[in-house]
Amino acid sequence: MPQENLDISPDHLPARLWQELTRAPHDRHHDWRTPILATQGIDGSGPQARTVVLRHADASLWTLRVYTDARSAKCSELLAQPLAQLTFWSKRLNWQLRVSALATVDFEGEQVNAAWERVGQSRAAADYLSVLPPGNPQSSGEPATEHSGNSPHGHHLAILNFKVCSMDWLALSKDGHRRARLTPAGMLQWLVP
Ligand SMILES: Cc1cc2nc3c(=O)[nH]c(=O)nc-3n(C[C@H](O)[C@H](O)[C@H](O)COP(=O)(O)O)c2cc1C
């Protein structure tokens, strides 16, 4: 158990959390690189949760960024209901972080072009070039090999931007768990874990 869980002061907690969030996109082994994104399903399909890769975190703006296929269900869900949650768990830190955020979706523009310039050169490019949209039925379970540029941009990469509204931090420890709610305005409220 990291001793830090007991020593960390309220003044340092936000900066300490953002230190981990900003590290995660650049560290393949960081548990916080792959949070669970929860959205509200459309047409009564209930909550929808899935793993995503955290691509960018901005500690001064309290924003997070994720890439996705513009045709995926999560895009339509976030357009219909922008309030979402990203849940992070780190075994190393024994910390869970539940981030409530308002999402916007960028389908085009400078950020999307810059992201595609990087992703388009990588093996992940295929994730944004499928002929059929994600979740579409297909005739077999074989990985799709056909790729298309049937989009105005030649790819389907979109950016999910999350403006953090609040964070719920839970630190597990054999000496007693700790939990706090934090907001971008500087509020910190200790909670019963
Ligand atoms: C480790 C891991 C990382 C993933 N990263 C992403 C990602 O960054 N963006 C994304 O759209 N889907 C990602 N996925 C796939 C999603 O979990 C999901 O299956 C897919 O996006 C379809 O979700 P939707 O139909 O609910 O929109 C990832 C899956 C795994 C297992």
Image: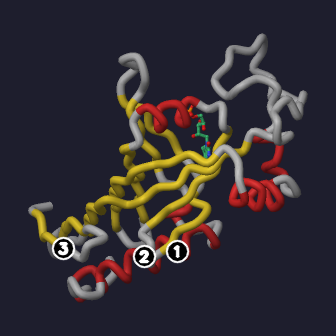
Secondary structure found at label 3: strand
On the picture, is 93 further left or further right than 178? right
Mark 1 vs mark 2, CA separation in Å? 6 Å
In front here: 56 or 8? 56
Which one is earlier in the sequence, the residue at label 3 or at label 2?
Answer: 2
Q: From the top left corner, tell me how far across and down residue 157 is, in percent.
A: 72, 45
In front here: 174 or 8? 8
Contact between marks 1 and 2 (CB within 8 A): the answer is yes
Q: Quadrant of the N terminus?
A: bottom left
Q: Residues within 10 Å of mark 1 (few under 14, many from 20)?
A: some
Q: From the top left corner, tell me how far across and down residue 53 is, in percent.
A: 59, 54
Q: Residue placed at 26% from the left, 61% from the top?
A: 168
**Residue at mark 1: C-beta within 8 A of ligand 1:** no
Question: Which residue is label 1 attached to?
Answer: 22
* Figure check: 133 above or below 113: above
In front here: 110 or 73? 110
Q: From the top left corner, tell me how far across and down residue 176 is, in percent.
A: 15, 71
The quarter of the displayed image where residue 143 is located: top right
Mark 1 vs mark 3, CA separation in Å? 20 Å
Question: Which residue is label 3 attached to?
Answer: 188
Q: Quadrant of the C terminus?
A: bottom left
Question: Which residue is label 2 attached to?
Answer: 18
Secondary structure found at label 2: helix
The quarter of the displayed image where residue 92 is located: bottom left
Which one is earlier in the sequence, the residue at label 1 or at label 3?
Answer: 1
Mark 3 vs mark 2, CA separation in Å? 15 Å
Q: Residue placed at 60% from the left, 67% from the top?
A: 25
